Amino acid sequence: MSIVLNKKEFHQEPYEFYKEIRPHDAFAKVKLVSGIQDSWVAFTYEAAEAVLKDERFVKNPRAVFPDVSEHELMPITHSMLFADPPDHRRLRSLVQRGFTPKMIQRLQGRIEEIAKIQVEQMKGKETVDLIADYAFPIPIIVICELLGVPPEDRLDFQRWSNSMVEINDDPSFYEQVEAHMKEFQLYIEQLLAEKRIHPQDDLLSELIRAEEDGDKLSVQELYGAIMLMIVAGHETTVNLIANGMLALFTHPEQLKKLKESPSLIDGAIEEILRFNGPVEFSTDRYAKESFTFMGKQLQKGDHVLVSLASADHDPAVFSEPDKLVITREKSPHLAFGKGIHYCLGAPLARLEGKIAIQTLLNTFPEIQINTALANLEWRQSFVIRGLKEPAGEIEL
Ligand code: HEM
């Protein structure tokens, strides 16, 4: 297919494109950005699930391009998200300890406190920006506290992580990304130097101990793990909260239902994840060898992605997929991925989303969106589906 997807019109209304392509191209080759190689993309639920579960699609670029130099790779490439077994298991199990459902449940009180502080700061104002004033600070403060990094530096993290997930055709784009990565790496170096002298009861100090143990984590893997969690913690749950509120505003009968029956919140979070989840495309995968997949001939090294957003709107699995229905009975959505790379932060994201939306609705029951929908602009990213800042103003 010769069209280039990374256009404003695509990001403004991707679901229309998916609706057209799914019936005749479950798994198709498309050009995401001009000037780079085409990518295979899974558009149907069946194809998406098949890619995510098939070990012939590898994550580590070095598995298919052995000549790729260290210089060409970003530090985050040394994290679990870009690793294959057996490295993947080792890297994931080191971080997993901080993310068990039990550990996350213990954070509930603190997340509630943070959400309350944010709503207190909003009281007395007539309108606020949904992302900057509410959806952004909550998950960022939580992840910073969990890792043990200073939440005051969050605007720097936001700048660096935006660089990794947004993509454009600007000739200086890759230079900018490289410059941001250098700043990010320098920051982590300084943070680690400080933590090595004064370890604390946080995930970073625990990872440093694993690195100092010698054979558990290399220094590059330590950088990769920290970067991955800062980026994952900054780019995702923010949009669960913001996309979720937007979905409720555009389905007033569902919003009313949720306000009348707050116990529907768990189902509402699952439906928001399905309806307009924060991760639109999976991260990169590569064909480990040449083989036929869904009737298409793949060559070793071919770039493969999964459109989680398209899969989650596939009418073969979800009835009336383009409607938000918070009481949907069963929702096997792929918003957190599937298989060995299934999102490690899913229990945390669900809890944060639930507390954030509940606190907002309880505190401001008359809350309304104040921006015309046509004026909302979506970010130019394939990984992240989220509104550009300043996002929708809300009236309290
Ligand atoms: C992986 C979605 C929040 C940490 C993933 C993947 C998805 C995803 C789809 C798999 C990507 C792939 O297979 O290519 C989401 C969504 C979130 C969210 C929708 C919020 C609503 C978080 C948070 C954290 C986190 C808060 C914690 C810091 C991770 C990690 C991985 C991952 C570490 C890699 C797992 C692995 O490779 O084994 N996430 N995520 N995520 N996510 Fe999340």
Image: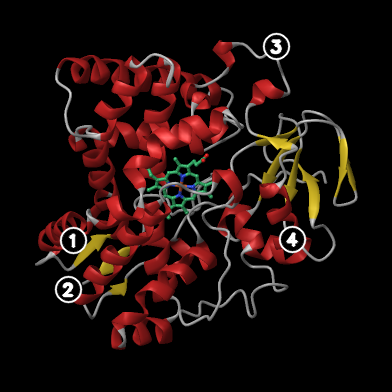
Residue 145 at what x, y percent from top left?
A: 21, 40
* Residue carrying label 3: 67
Q: CA distance from mark 2 to mark 4?
A: 41 Å
Compare marks 2 and 3 and give the one earlier in the sequence: 3
The one nearer the camera, 345 or 369, is 345
Compare marks 3 and 1 and give the one earlier in the sequence: 3
Look at 67% across and 65% down and name the residue there. Answer: 16
Question: In the figure, is residue 317 to the left or right of 158?
Answer: right
Identify residue type, mark 3: Asp
Q: CA distance from mark 3 to mark 4?
A: 34 Å
Question: In the figure, is residue 110 to the left or right of 307?
Answer: left
The one nearer the camera, 317 or 118, is 317
Residue 149 at what x, y percent from top left?
A: 23, 32
Question: In the figure, is residue 341 to the left or right of 185?
Answer: right
- Disc tally is 4
* Residue carrying label 4: 46
Identify residue type, mark 1: Glu
> Element type at marker 1?
helix
The answer to whether the beta carbon of the residue marked 1 is less than 8 Å from any atom of ligand 1 is: no
Quadrant placement of the C terminus: bottom left
The answer to whether the beta carbon of the residue marked 3 is less than 8 Å from any atom of ligand 1 is: no
Query: Mark 3 and 1 residues: CB-CB less than 8 Å, in contact?
Result: no
Compare marks 1 and 2 and give the one earlier in the sequence: 1
Compare marks 2 and 4 and give the one earlier in the sequence: 4
Which tag is nearer the camera, tag 2 or tag 3? 3
Give the number of the disc on residue 363.
Answer: 2
Q: CA distance from mark 4 to mark 1?
A: 38 Å
Query: Mark 2 and 3 residues: CB-CB less than 8 Å, in contact?
Result: no
* Residue carrying label 1: 112
